[in-house]
Image (tube, grey):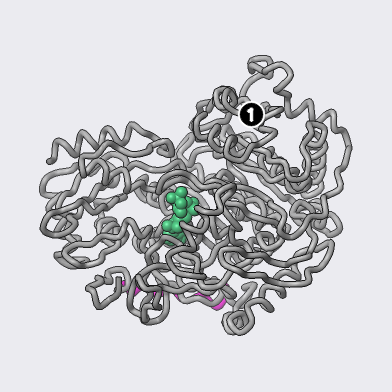
Amino acid sequence: MSEKEGTISALMTEDRRYAPAAEFTSHANWSDPEVYQRALGDPEGFWSEMARAIDWFEDWDTVLEWDPPTTKWFLGARVNVSYNCVDRHLKTWRKNKAAIIWEGEPGDTRVLTYQELYREVNRCAAAMRRLGVQKGDRVALYLGMVPELPIAMLACARLGAPHTVVFGGFSPESLRDRIVDCHAKLLVTADGAWRRGKVVDLKGNADRALEGCPSIENVLVVNRVAPPEQASMVEGRDRWWHDEMDASGTDTVEPESLDSEHPLYILYTSGTTGKPKGLLHTTGGYLVGVHTTAKYVFDLKDEDTYWCAADVGWVTGHSYIVYGPLSNGASSIMYEGAPDYPGKNRFWQIIEKYRANILYTAPTAIRAFMKWGAEHPAGHDLSSLRLLGTVGEPINPEAWVWYRDNIGSGRTPVVDTWWQTETGMTLITPLPGMTVLKPGSATFPFPGVEADIVDEAGESVPLGGGGYLVLKRPWPAMARTIWGDAERWYDQYWSQFPGIYFTGDGAKRDEDGYFWLLGRVDDVLNVAGHRIGTMEVESALVSHPSVAEAAVIGINHEIKGQAIGAFVTLRGDQAASPELITELKLHVGEKIGPIARPDTLIPTGELPKTRSGKIMRRLLRDVAEGRVVGDTTTLQDPGVLDAIKDKYEETE
Ligand code: ATP
Ligand code: MG
């Protein structure tokens, strides 16, 4: 996949540049690029220096033990994540600082100071302990975005009982699969969750899931949506969260002094590519990784009101709503509901209301905001924002610039952060006080992280070329294995290139060394011998004023190898005339080259997305190639696919 073989580098011709403002740099947590050199020269020294920001009960003897695919960090050290996120702040002025600023979808609010969070976490840990949860036991958490979720996570961390958070949008089957896979002993759920003004029946789903989960002994139920007497509780198994918290009174639970490599959590990936994998994250290294990146990537300060708008059910929420910000003593907003409820301006209302300074969200959300129109943010005072971030998918330059102009008042840095459930922390990202930004590029590896782009033989591809994104050196927050499946851990990530972690993503690097993510390797197109990222064609489509969102796939083609199929969602109330379709095809031709012109272009109301909001190109390929559509359990709205299928058959 090198330049020589005919890579078209549409993305890399993006020529807009955004240097950090002097004002920002002068106050930035890091502004001297020397940190890159320092980390490169002595990565272990660099990470142990970063580790000094954590409170350890006992120091490590060895920083790193690396025998791929096995990695251990801070060996011999003893530490507790809950202690670092809560207890240690009580000895400082942060004791009465807001830790979690929670906004419910119906408009109710709750603010927990660090002291209050400490109380809640202790009461929850005491309740879990009474229910028989011990160090090493797994606890499943199936909740909406309510404060009880981080409280339960921190209680688990306190006890050394690894949690597995299952996103509240998942079905009973998905919940059951995950509980069965990790043999969870306790389930924490709620009577329901608010989503777009309706109740998601978490308890009903949990009851169905538990029909096949013999490992679960008890269920703790948070009362969120209706009077408690309306819930159906199973005698002897289900207990109300509030009753158990009351029973805990003022009990405290000493944070367990845990080995640095003690399991902290298991998290199943979002499932874009197939069966979800339970990635295991451990304690010391993970904490160092998320603490450091939260502080320097978001330039997090004590004065900031920080908002990561992801769901705690995904790794982004684990690392950058809970563990990263709280270990830094930050004030973090947590919002329960949908971005368009009750109106399409809900996010901007929240930012204005709390004077949020930092916003971290996903390209799919940004493209939805673009589609809804700039009038929504324009109606609110967003001047408190000083930094924006994005994660989850490649962001096309148009969306990046729109985000900066319309949300960041054309003033804020935008950090495009590349990482995965497996990596635990951001690995490729700008440092906002020093990186000159190029829209659409995640820029450079974080200090102490060694990323490279290699060809099929594992040889590093020279600047200007593209290939497979790999990591050549371990980083502290990396997953240690797939729970219960060491073989898959090896096969999936370590078997392609010996001793090197393979991300599964394709990327290019320009002459200045900037990384441009192309999405999954399986999504890269091969048209008449040319390698084109689906991302590049999508970007070209979205740069047309009529297009809000696009998904591009390769369709097997006898002559060309692959033909290009495009599915587009139009902005606002645009009509999909045949003229517009032709115009869009030509537009791609102009932006990238005639070879990249889509053969088929189908306007569609919505695109099939995972529950985390990512486009599922795999399913679109199934539709286009006339196959039975594969596993759709992770789809947010399976109906979308039927509509596309009908449209597709009409067009063919
Ligand atoms: P599965 O592994 O089960 O198929 P998934 O890969 O979607 O699901 P995540 O771990 O949530 O699950 O997502 C990580 C992936 O998201 C990355 O491998 C990459 O493809 C994409 N990604 C995340 N952030 C970025 C970014 N800033 N730029 C480009 N791609 C990104
Ligand atoms: Mg993945």
Picture quarter with the C terminus: top left
176 or 343, nearer to the observer: 176
Vertical relation: 82 (above or below) 408: above
**What type of secondary structure mainly makes up the magenta span?**
loop
Image point (52%, 55%), residue name: 489
Q: Amino acid at mark 1?
A: Ala
326 or 573, nearer to the observer: 326
Image point (78%, 25%), residue name: 243
Is residue 233 something one can see in this rendering? yes
Image point (61%, 58%), residue name: 480
Residue tagged 1: 190
**Range covered by the magenta-colored residues:** 14-24
95 or 648, nearer to the observer: 648
Under circle 1, the secondary element is strand
Compared across the picture, whether 507 is left or right of 556 comes to: right
Compared across the picture, whether 180 is left or right of 63 comes to: left
Vertical relation: 403 (above or below) 606: below
Q: Position of residue 250 (x, y in %)?
A: 88, 37
Image point (42%, 43%), residue name: 610
Any magenta on residue 22?
Answer: yes
For disc 1, does the CB lie below 8 Å from ligand 1?
no
